[in-house]
Amino acid sequence: MQDLRGGPLSYAPPLTARERFRRTMHYQQVDYISHLEFGYWTELKEDWMREGHLPVSMRQPDGTIPDRLVEEFFGVEQFEHLSARLTAMPLRETQILEKTENTVTYRDGIGVLRQDKSSGTETIPHFLEFPIRDRASWEAFRDEFLDPAWPGRRYGAAELAGLEQMTRQSTNPVVTDLGSYIGRIRDWVGFESLALMSVDNPDLVEEMVAHQATLALTLMPQVLERGFIDAAGGWEDIAFNSGPLLSPRFFVERIMPHMAPVTRLLREHGIDVIWTDCDGNILKLIPLWLGVGVNCMFPLEVHPGNDPVALKQQYGRDLLIRGGFDKFALWQGREAVLAELRRIEPMVLAGGYIPHVDHRCPALVPWDTYCYYVWEKCHMLGWPEDMIKAFPFYQHWQGR
């Protein structure tokens, strides 16, 4: 692999998507680097379908257009997921409280009172009330939604055997859960309330974090001992453009000690590619996560200040990356797309880095620009041109 559109290259026999992912993340020789993405805003999918670019057959009976189908249309490789069932369970039925021409107000499955736009551009929902306010409400929430012994969290023998077989046979990489150690707590307490609680009642916050770890350590063995698993992924979203919501010291003292046993358990079962999803500026969190074994950053949003080139230079092979292509370039046209790809190319070709848009592809991205992005990105990744032309999108792309 040389550079973008760098001429004919030699290729080894094709690997499976699973082999390609594992070798890319371990700095090993590959036929071509993994082609992954992170999905699309609903508005963008609707626009592309309305413009006739996406097949109407993608629309499901419930009206949705699944990200996976759109990704496969662009030749994107896929993950298979083996869930350890670490989320809030069982959920209540959603209660619709009020509908207007523009909004819907409802109480969701975990008791959060929220108001969403009912039409138009997708935005961050407006939260009105959270279920956890103090120790009493935490204990009630914990007992209802986070009981490790709830029967629905356990797989039956036949179900687990089927999942094991899937992980043996899959040609896609298989991912299991890392869990969430403060991000979901933020969802249950609220941004502002969590910030205040971390100062006024840090022991209570840490108790919630510890319970998340207990949930993981209790439930993960059932899948780790049976599944053939390539990576683990978690979710946090605990940073703004200026940095994390909570102080790095709070992370060091109250959060990371509880994450460490979970990542250690994963590594004991041979899983050494471990990421967490966190938007915003995560520069102060990266060394903390690395210190407890979370070695892959995703989706690495560029605009808040996360530069994949600088980070790979700073941390070397200790740091793996998924993402890191500035989504803003997609609004600026072909020249900006090519410039951004050329900027990150040296780090991509060095290994341990799978580039894709640094969040879900946003609304108002022109079809031609996105097709051009996929075309040039896959060339950078070393994919043979005849394979790129075989991706379904290519037959619908008039700008080639």
Image: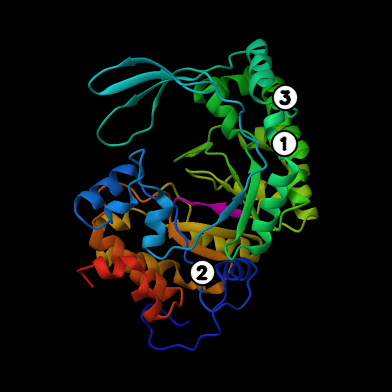
The three-letter code of the residue at mark 1 reads Arg
Is residue 223 or residue 44 the one in the foreground? 223
Q: Nearer the viewer, mark 1 or mark 3?
A: 1
Which label is found at residue 127?
none
Q: Which residues are magenta?
A: 296-302
Label 2 neighbourhood size at 10 Å, few (<14), some (14-19), many (20+)? Answer: many
Query: For the point 26% across and 18% down, which residue is it?
Result: 100
Query: Are the residues at dot 2 and dot 3 in contact (C-beta closer than 8 Å)?
Result: no
Query: Are the residues at dot 2 and dot 1 in contact (C-beta closer than 8 Å)?
Result: no
Q: Is residue 327 magenta?
A: no
Furthest residue in direction top, as rendered:
136
Q: Is residue 229 visible?
A: no
- Where is residue 146, by image quadrant? top right
To which residue does mark 3 refer?
207
Which label is found at residue 154?
1
Mark 2 to mark 1 CA distance (whole Å): 42 Å
Is 54 rendered above or below residue 265? below
Which label is found at residue 347?
2
Is 251 rendered above or below residue 55? above
The three-letter code of the residue at mark 2 reads Met
The location of residue 119, given as percent across then percent down, is 26, 31
Query: For the point 29% across and 48% down, which residue is it?
Result: 44
The location of residue 180, given as percent across then percent down, is 62, 37
Mark 2 to mark 3 CA distance (whole Å): 40 Å
Secondary structure at numbered mark 3: helix
Q: Nearer the viewer, mark 2 or mark 3?
A: 3
